[in-house]
Amino acid sequence: MKSDQDSESTQDSTQVVECSHYERHCQKRCPAPKCQQWVECRLCHNDKYPMHELDRYKVTEIRCKSCDTVQPPSKKCTKCCLTFARYYCDICHLWENKLPKA
């Protein structure tokens, strides 16, 4: 269990906000040198920061929503082993739990 102090030390100025576009258990860090904001997805980023677009192919850091571990993009957390989503694409860095119906 995280203490209040731990939560404060790992949180950026950006608060965790739920995404209306995708369902997942991680956040992406914008790779643009002048941005570096943690966001739920590229669409949320582009809505909030319209001066540039998040290039999903260049994402190099993600953060687990459960334990706040920062790591390279992957299907599950390297610390707590939480699977971020049922579907993950290592090329475009897309995580999604809501799969299309067949």
Image: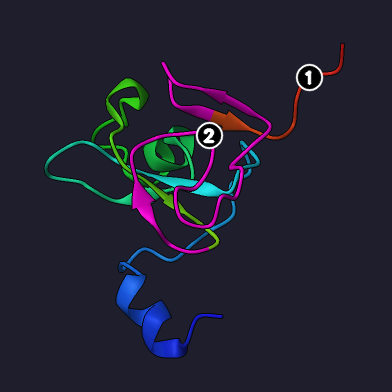
Amino acid type, mark 2: Lys
The residue that disc 2 covers is 75
State the scheme by which the image is colored. rainbow
| Residue range highlighted in magenta | 67-94
Residue sitting at the far top: 102
Q: Which mark is residue 100?
A: 1
In reply to whether residue 100 is colored magenta, the answer given is: no
In reply to whether residue 91 is colored magenta, the answer given is: yes
For residue 25, side relative to residue 102 (left or right)? left
Kindly report the secondary structure that dominates the magenta region of the rendered protein: loop
Residue drawn at point x = 33 percent, y = 21 percent: 57
Q: Secondary structure at mark 2?
A: loop
Amino acid type, mark 1: Pro
Residue sitting at the far left: 33
Q: Nearer the viewer, mark 1 or mark 2?
A: 2
User: Where's residue 26, x and y in %?
Assistant: 50, 47
Q: Which picture quadrant has residue 11?
A: bottom left
Which of the two residues, 33 or 5, is positioned nearer the viewer here? 5
Residue drawn at point x = 47 percent, y = 42 percent: 44
Residue sitting at the far bottom: 4
Q: Secondary structure at mark 1?
A: loop
User: Where's residue 91, x and y in %?
Assistant: 41, 16
Q: Quadrant of the N terminus?
A: bottom right
Q: Quadrant of the C terminus?
A: top right
Q: Which picture quadrant has residue 86?
A: top right
For residue 75, side relative to residue 11 (left or right)? right
Crowd class of label 2 (few under 14; some 14 to 19; many from 20; radius 10 Å)? many
Residue drawn at point x = 31 percent, y = 38 percent: 50
Q: CA distance from mark 1 to mark 2?
A: 19 Å
Which of the two residues, 54 or 86, is positioned nearer the viewer here? 86
